[in-house]
Amino acid sequence: MSIAGIFPIKNWDFDSESILMDLPADELTALTAHQSIHNYDKGEVIFREGAFPSGIFYISKGMAKKFKVDKEGREQIIYVAGPGELIGYHAILSEDRYPDSAAALEKSKIIFIPKEDFLRVLAKSNVLSKRLLKTLSHEFAVLINGLTLVAKRSVKERLALQLIVMREKYKVNNHSANIVEINLSRDDLANLVGTTKENVVRILTEFENEGILKRKGRKIIVQKVKHLVEISNYK
């Protein structure tokens, strides 16, 4: 089932996949002249908070989480990026260290573009600079929505909303939009929602008993996305 018309996914999802789409041929050639392709296993770190950036990362296949770790070692997932999305470019634009870390959520193929090539094309490209500015403005709005969600919504509402968002992301890897498997560990899902693993398991069981979803091992299949939209209380 499509969520078009019943849930404003753009309010909760970044739009970085449009940054490199249909760039002028000469600009795309210059940008990718020295790219390299890397394969990451689940849990493998792509970059770490506090490190100096050496380039940007384009997710060709798979999923990656952007996260921060507090003093007690607890992880908070800020965002999950999927195929077609860019990560790691914020630190380059701000000329600063990475503000967060990134790691693969599953086996992933990621293209690395050196910082020098990215900045060289950015300095000359009106298309790329305008798209980056638009994307950064949108991402700021998404992050504000996320902060409001944690502050004002119950754990049940937050979990329902994140399941909706993850369902849309995992559609990319499914041939049928009606059967979408969300392949996240309960720890990652808890860190995304901002709660404990125990709370996530309890609410997932409740949702399953109500026929809203079913579980196959760690995989989650949403059966009644409209019910999740109602529970999420996103407005």
Image (tube, rainbow, N blue to C red):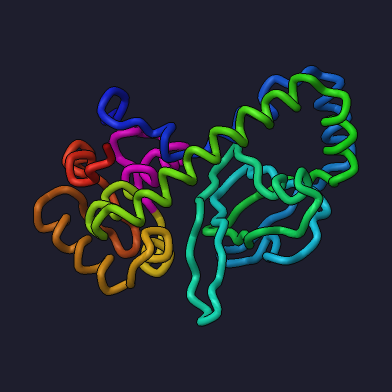
Residue sitting at x 55%, y 39%: 139
Q: Give 171 or 102, whichever is nearer the viewer.
A: 102
Residue sitting at x 41%, y 43%: 145
Figure check: 81 above or below 49: above
Q: Quadrant of residue 168?
A: top left
Q: Quadrant of residue 23?
A: top right
For the N terminus, which image quadrant?
A: top left
Could you tell me how many numbered marks the image carries? 0
Q: Is residue 175 magenta?
A: yes
Residue 153 pos. (x, y %): 27, 53
Range of magenta residues:
164-182
Residue 164 pos. (x, y %): 32, 43
Residue sitting at x 36%, y 59%: 193
Q: Quadrant of residue 111?
A: top right
For the C terminus, which image quadrant?
A: top left
Figure check: 193 above or below 75: above
